[in-house]
Image (cartoon, rainbow, N blue to C red):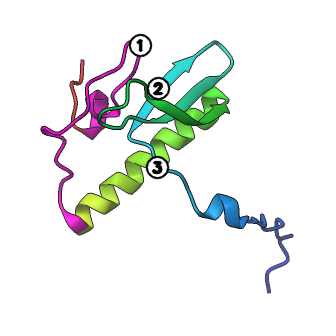
Amino acid sequence: MDNQPKSPQLQLELRPEVAQGSYSNLAIISHSHSEFIIDFATSLPGMPKAQIGQRIIMTPEHAKRLMNALFDNVSKYEASFGVIDLGGGAPPKPQGGFDLGSFGPFGGSKS
């Protein structure tokens, strides 16, 4: 018999307006000593500016956990569906922006 106290399970609520989701094809990432800021934007052909739809602010520890979770999920996706091709078709980088495709284990340069 297990006499270990069980930790309470986290309950999540997904409101309908959030469940709909939002599209992003551009992420701009910046950081300070104490936080990471990720702006998710949409860049559309013929539009002069990319529209920021969401800004997520998190601690460096949570940013690293997110990076690890994304890497794990991309690896599982590629194991099931094949390697994600990052060649061609990418929109131009905005000034001060950051193209996720050029970052580390996701197919970009590793310096």
Q: Nearer the viewer, mark 1 or mark 3?
A: 3
Report how far apart the C-alphas of labels 2 and 3 lie in the structure.
14 Å
Mark 2 or mark 3: whose residue is earlier in sequence: 3
Q: Are marks 1 and 2 in contact (CB under 8 Å)?
A: yes
Secondary structure under the numbered disc 1 in the rendered image: loop
The stretch drawn in magenta includes residue 25: no
Quadrant for the C terminus, please.
Answer: top left
Residue type of the residue flagged with mark 2: Ile
Name the residue nearer the viewer: 105 or 85: 85
Query: Looking at the image, which residue is at 66% across and 22% down?
Result: 35
Crowd around label 3: few <14 · some 14–19 · many ≥20 (10 Å): few
Mark 1 or mark 3: whose residue is earlier in sequence: 3
Report how far apart the C-alphas of labels 1 and 3 lie in the structure.
21 Å
Secondary structure under the numbered disc 3 in the rendered image: loop
Secondary structure under the numbered disc 2 in the rendered image: strand
The stretch drawn in magenta includes residue 87: yes
Look at the image and give the residue range highlighted in magenta: 81-106
Query: Looking at the image, which residue is at 50% across and 32% down?
Result: 51
Where residue 93 appears, as percent x and y from the top left, is 30, 22
Quadrant for the N terminus, please.
Answer: bottom right
Q: Residue furthest left?
A: 88
Mark 1 or mark 2: whose residue is earlier in sequence: 2
Crowd around label 2: few <14 · some 14–19 · many ≥20 (10 Å): some
Image mark for residue 107 = none
Residue type of the residue flagged with mark 3: Tyr
For disc 3, the marked residue is 23
Number of callouts in the render?
Answer: 3
For disc 1, the marked residue is 96
Q: Are marks 1 and 3 in contact (CB under 8 Å)?
A: no
For disc 2, the marked residue is 28
Query: Looking at the image, which residue is at 82% across and 70% down?
Result: 6
Residue type of the residue flagged with mark 1: Gly
